[in-house]
Image: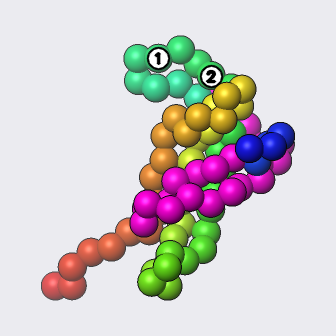
Amino acid sequence: MGDNVYAVPLPDGSTAAVFVRGVWRDYARQHGAAKLAYQVGFQGADKNDNPIDMTYIVDAKGGKVLDRWSNIETGKPG
């Protein structure tokens, strides 16, 4: 996509275009080299109106999603 705009995968299998501005982190996998990366937050709803609150770590040079996780926690009652 364009400068600082990345297509990020959503949990329902679709993608969303996300504009990233000057937030970055040095990011390293457990056994990988440090990389300059953006930490991107995405909040919204899927096609069934379920809430989405995702964090993505995006490679600052290539735009590849290095890691992602949901910030929504669920649990069983009782």
Q: According to the image, label 1 marks what residue?
A: 32
Q: Which amino acid is tagged 1?
A: Gly
Residue 44 quadrant: bottom right
Q: Is residue 21 magenta?
A: yes
Q: Is residue 47 above or below residue 69?
A: below
Residue 17 locus on image (x, y percent): 69, 57
* Picture quarter with the C terminus: bottom left
Q: Which residue does the image show at 38% across and 69% down from the upper left?
A: 73
Residue 16 locus on image (x, y percent): 62, 60
Local crowd size for mark 2, using a 10 Å CA cut-off: few (<14), some (14–19), many (≥20): some
Q: According to the image, label 2 marks what residue?
A: 35
Residue 41 locus on image (x, y percent): 64, 57
Local crowd size for mark 1, using a 10 Å CA cut-off: few (<14), some (14–19), many (≥20): few
Q: Is residue 73 above or below residue 40?
A: below
Q: Which amino acid is tagged 2?
A: Lys
* Residue nearest the viewer, comparing 15 with 41: 15
The outermost residue toward the left is 78
